[in-house]
Image (tube, rainbow, N blue to C red):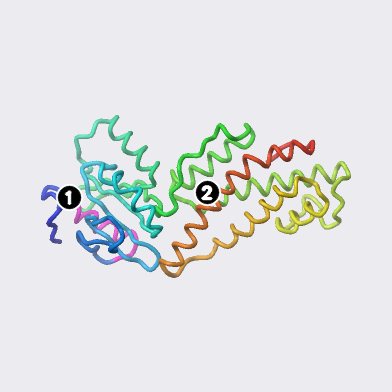
Amino acid sequence: MDFSILPSHLHKIAESANFIIKNRYGLTDGLVEQEIEPHIPLRPTLHWKTPTQYIVCEVAERPFPVSIKQQFADIVSTGVPIRIIVAYPKENDLSGKDYSSDIKESKKFGIGYMSVNETKVGDIEYQGISLAQHITQVDLTKYIKTVKPYVSEAYEHYMLKGDPDVGLQKIGQVIESMLYNVAVQAKKDGSFVYIGFKPPKYIAQALLISELIKENILDISILVRCKDFANDRNAVSHKAKSRKKAAEIEAKMKENFIIGTRILQDLPLKIKDKGYKVKI
């Protein structure tokens, strides 16, 4: 592989990274030091075009180079599905403190990282996320004690583990569980009389919410928000077959996650307003 921008002492690292990434994702050799698209401010060491996203590898001395942070906002603003993985030498001069700081920043920004040597041996330690899905750290002080650990876990899956779909699923499950438990309490006190609700028997969430709305069990506006969230969440469960469709799904998934976390700020208050306990 011919590199003209990358410093010569990192050429072998780049070749190793190319080998590892193409085998991990079933790709051919990456394009070397070429722009991704004219409107994307990035000319990475290597990149690949897949049907649903761009996979980018930037080779650097450390897991989170300054150049990535400088270009981050511009890349995210394009809305294009781009996954960045930084490859850095396994043998390096980073202190433990600097390494820990880089790893923390990488996960905060959703940037993947991998340590490699010059003999094509290495590990993708964190694969990152498509940057179009990036969200900032969730402020856990906005949640009641019962809900807080669940939101933290969902954010961890979304950003820190690089599984946005799992993170969104976690948020959805918490909302669903809270509403189900409200229905159980309302049935016990005689407020909820829908005959189709027979706990612990399963009931579709959309149906349950509709019946809760009909019987005015909780504030109507919060129930409508929950119903819309459930419908939108189902809409992003399909697999994309093109980068354009992937961009649409990823944007919606990000929006849904944010909406879901806001519902979890407000729903417990509405539950308490009606005299019910918040249970998950």
Q: Tell me which secondary structure the magenta stretch mostly adopts.
A: helix
Image position of 77 (left or right of 16): right
- The amino acid type found where label 2 is placed reads Gly
Q: Are marks 1 and 2 in contact (CB under 8 Å)?
A: no
Mark 1 neighbour density, 10 Å: few (under 14) some (14–19) many (20 or more) = some
Query: Residue 224 location in percent, x, y?
Result: 70, 53
At 74% from the left edge and 40% from the top edge, which residue is drawn?
A: 271
Q: Residue at x 20, y 42 (%)?
A: 61
Residue occupied by mark 1:
118
- Where residue 5 appears, as percent x and y from the top left, is 14, 54
Three-letter code for the amino acid on which mark 1 is drawn:
Glu
**Picture coordinates of residue 222 (x, y %)?**
70, 47
Nearer-N-terminus badge (1/2): 1
Q: Decide whether residue 230 is among the magenta residues.
A: no
Instruction: Tell me the SS state at disc 2.
Output: helix
Which residue range is magenta in the image? 14-27
The residue tagged with tag 1: helix, strand or loop?
loop
